[in-house]
């Protein structure tokens, strides 16, 4: 707001508020420990507690992009997507088709191979 009524302030916590996520700890956690924690969490119901067919594995293109530490613009330029399409997928307004999901999966598994395959210098 231009009238100065809203002011952003930075808060340095000696200790984070109760219930806050310690992301450094999450990043350090291995798969086995994370799985064990999820199973022991009383607020996390098991998949068996849902009716059959109600849990579909969700595909999130932003997971691939974020895992690679890339901005939308970088990801789109590197792998040949339009920024607008990527934004639409990430905002849930549209979904990539089956072929694009497969391509995104290949990017997630081996991004360096995809980069090499798309390198225009290598093709010339």
Image (cartoon, rainbow, N blue to C red):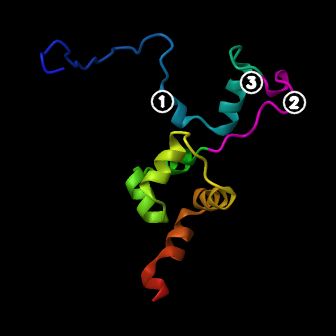
Q: Say what secondary structure mark 3 lies in.
A: helix
Label 2 CA crowd tier, 10 Å (few <14, some 14–19, many 20+): few
The residue wearing badge 3 is 39
Q: Quadrant of the C terminus?
A: bottom left
Residue 23 numbered mark, or none: 1
Residue furthest to the bottom in view is: 124
Q: Which residue is more in the foreground, 93 or 60?
A: 93
The residue located at (51%, 48%) in the rendering is 67
Q: Quadrant of residue 16?
A: top left
> Does the rendering let one see residue 29?
yes
The residue wearing badge 2 is 52
The residue located at (49%, 51%) in the rendering is 86
Label 1 near label 2: C-beta < 8 Å?
no
Residue furthest to the front in view is: 93
Which x, y percent locates residue 32?
A: 70, 36
Sequence-wise, which precedes: disc 3 or disc 2? 3
Is 123 positioned to the left or the right of 9 in the image? right
Q: Which residue is more in the foreground, 30 or 91?
A: 91
Is residue 104 located in the magenta-colored stretch of the structure?
A: no
Is residue 57 located in the magenta-colored stretch of the structure?
A: yes
Label 2 near label 3: C-beta < 8 Å?
no
Residue furthest to the right in view is: 52
Is 88 positioned to the left or the right of 41 in the image? left
């Amino acid at each position: 707001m231009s009238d100065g009524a809203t002011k952003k302030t930075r808060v340095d916590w000696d200790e984070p508020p109760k219930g806050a996520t310690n992301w450094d700890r999450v990043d350090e956690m291995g798969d086995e420990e994370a799985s064990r924690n999820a199973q022991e969490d009383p607020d996390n119901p098991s998949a068996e507690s849902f009716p059959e067919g109600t849990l579909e594995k969700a595909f999130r293109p932003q997971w691939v992009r974020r895992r690679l530490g890339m901005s939308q613009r970088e990801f789109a330029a590197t792998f040949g997507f339009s920024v607008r399409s990527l934004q639409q997928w990430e905002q849930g307004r549209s979904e990539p088709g089956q072929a694009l999901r497969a391509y995104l999966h290949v990017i997630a598994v081996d991004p360096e191979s995809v980069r090499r395959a798309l390198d225009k210098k290598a093709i010339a």
